[in-house]
Image (tube, rainbow, N blue to C red):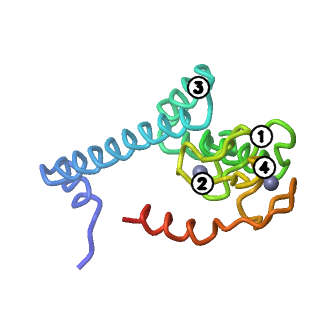
Amino acid sequence: MSFGLTEIIQFLNSPSFTLWQIVVLVYIGLLWLSLIIWVTRDAISRSNSLSFQIFAILLTIAIPLLGVILYLIIRPGRTHVERYYEELEKHLFEEKGEDGQTCKKCLTILDKTFIYCPNCLAKLKKTCNKCHQSFPDPWNSCPYCGSIQKEPVKKIKMKVSLKK
Ligand SMILES: [Zn+2]
Ligand SMILES: [Zn+2]
């Protein structure tokens, strides 16, 4: 059994073919629409430039489906969030020097004079029980007067109470 040209033409004119056409068109339409939404979100997360965002959306609308591939080629390599973390990393590796310090627990950049991290409550420094100078928390003796600190025991207790 083989299909002749007349059968094909008959099929193309039949209501079932029209139904298939509608289904396929709706499917492509939805796909296109979701790609436009995705490109809009992606362009906003990668660029602050309104003209770039509009260009990306227009590109996706003007060239259905293939426009997305073109967008993927021209879009900026990093999102705002990725750029933020890169900046943060740079700060951490550069060491803030005179004016700052980094919280070892939550990595927030803080003023050098802070003793507690206002973000995660971690203790950044301890105060000497003899001369009252502050110095980094892991040290067990004061670098200013040499007195040995008895704090570690207290610190363990504090950590337990924080966890509760
Ligand atoms: Zn912290
Ligand atoms: Zn001291």
Crowding at dot 2, Cα within 10 Å, few <14 / some 14-19 / many 20+, comes out as: few
Give the total number of marks visible in the rendering. Answer: 4
x, y percent for residue 78: 67, 45
Badge 1 is on which residue? 100
**Real-space Cα distance between discs 3 and 1?**
41 Å
Crowding at dot 4, Cα within 10 Å, few <14 / some 14-19 / many 20+, comes out as: few
Q: Identify the secondary structure beneath mark 1.
A: strand
Q: Is mark 3 within 8 Å of ligand 1?
A: no
Crowding at dot 3, Cα within 10 Å, few <14 / some 14-19 / many 20+, comes out as: some
Report the amino acid beneath label 3. Phe
Q: Identify the secondary structure beneath mark 3.
A: helix
Q: Is mark 1 within 8 Å of ligand 1?
A: no
**Real-space Cα distance between discs 2 and 3?**
39 Å
Report the amino acid beneath label 4. Cys
Q: Is residue 56 above or below residue 51?
A: below
Nearer to us: label 3 or label 4:
4
Report the amino acid beneath label 2. Cys
Q: Is mark 2 within 8 Å of ligand 1?
A: yes
x, y percent for residue 104: 67, 57
| Image quadrant where residue 97 sits | top right
Sequence order check: which comes first, mark 4 or mark 2? 2
Q: Is mark 4 within 8 Å of ligand 2?
A: yes
**Real-space Cα distance between discs 1 and 4?**
23 Å
Q: Identify the secondary structure beneath mark 2.
A: loop
Are dots 3 and 4 in contact, CB under 8 Å? no
Nearer to us: label 4 or label 2:
4
Badge 4 is on which residue? 131
**Which residue is the extreme one toward the front?**
130
Q: Identify the secondary structure beneath mark 4.
A: loop
Sequence order check: which comes first, mark 3 or mark 4? 3
